[in-house]
Amino acid sequence: MGGSSAAAARRAAHIADDWFPPLEEKLWPPYREECIKLGKPDPGTYPKQGPIFLWIAANPEKAWEQVLPHVQHQLQSYSQWTQEAFGKPAGPYAGKQMTPETIRQSPAYKVLTPDQALELVATLGQHSVLYLNPLLAGIDPEISWQMLKLYEREVHPYIR
């Protein structure tokens, strides 16, 4: 479950099997405290975060062509929703140009080869999280399966 408030963090402790904080460490304590209060395992300190969207590809340039329209759609949708809810884009969508170039340069969205993904894992260390989001904003399931199978073969066996 995702969310960007302390209330969302506490809700996640109650109804979800984990919580996806929007890269804001300050929102981790309410989640952790609620898990402990409920008698669930302590999720520990805030883990180091990988990109919120990680795509594994043998050919990153081709993969960007396939996934970038979906990433743009997600970002534009969230921007529109926060605009409607708060009168202006909020959170990570506030005041940012969401061009193909800025998205590709963002640390939040990465398309990496298996070797680059393993380098990222090594950089993040043991207490960290990687997020694969294979069906982001309508990505073709066939393309998603190809990515997941590549991850399964060439990345997952080499990480804890």
Image (tube, grey):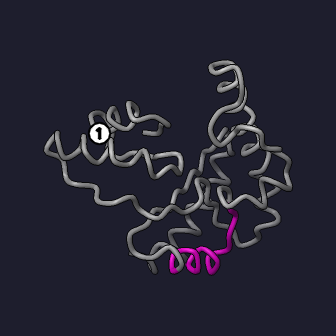
Residue drawn at (71%, 37%) of the image: 94
Outermost residue on the left side: it is 39
Q: Which residue lies furthest to the front in this view?
A: 26
Disc 1 marks a residue whose amino acid type is Ala
Residue 11 coordinates in the image, percent (x, y): 33, 32
Q: In which quarter of the image is the N terminus?
A: top left
Q: Where is residue 101 in the image (x, y as percent from the top left)?
A: 86, 56
Please rate how many residues cluster around mark 1, counting C-alpha atoms within 10 Å: few if below 14, some from 14 to 19, many from 20.
Answer: many
Q: In which quarter of the image is residue 64?
A: bottom right
Is 67 contained in the magenta span? Answer: no
Dominant SS of magenta comes to helix
Residue 9 location, quadrant: top left
What is the tally of numbered marks visible in this picture? 1
Residue at 32 percent of width and 41 percent of height: 30
Helix, strand or loop at disc 1?
Answer: helix
Read off the residue under disc 1.
13
Front position in the image: 69 or 37: 37
Which segment is the magenta one?
Answer: 110-122
In the image, what residue occupies the spot 60% across and 45% down?
A: 135
Asked if residue 131 lies left or right of residue 47, the reply is: right
In the rendered image, which quarter contains the C terminus? bottom left
- 65 or 100: which is nearer to us? 100
Location of residue 114 in the rendering, given as x and y in whole percent from the top left corner: 62, 76
Position of residue 118 measured from the top left corner of the image (x, y, whole percent):
56, 78
- In the displayed structure, does residue 63 sit left or right of residue 7? right
- The question of residue 119 being in magenta is answered with yes
| Left or right relative to 110: residue 63 | right
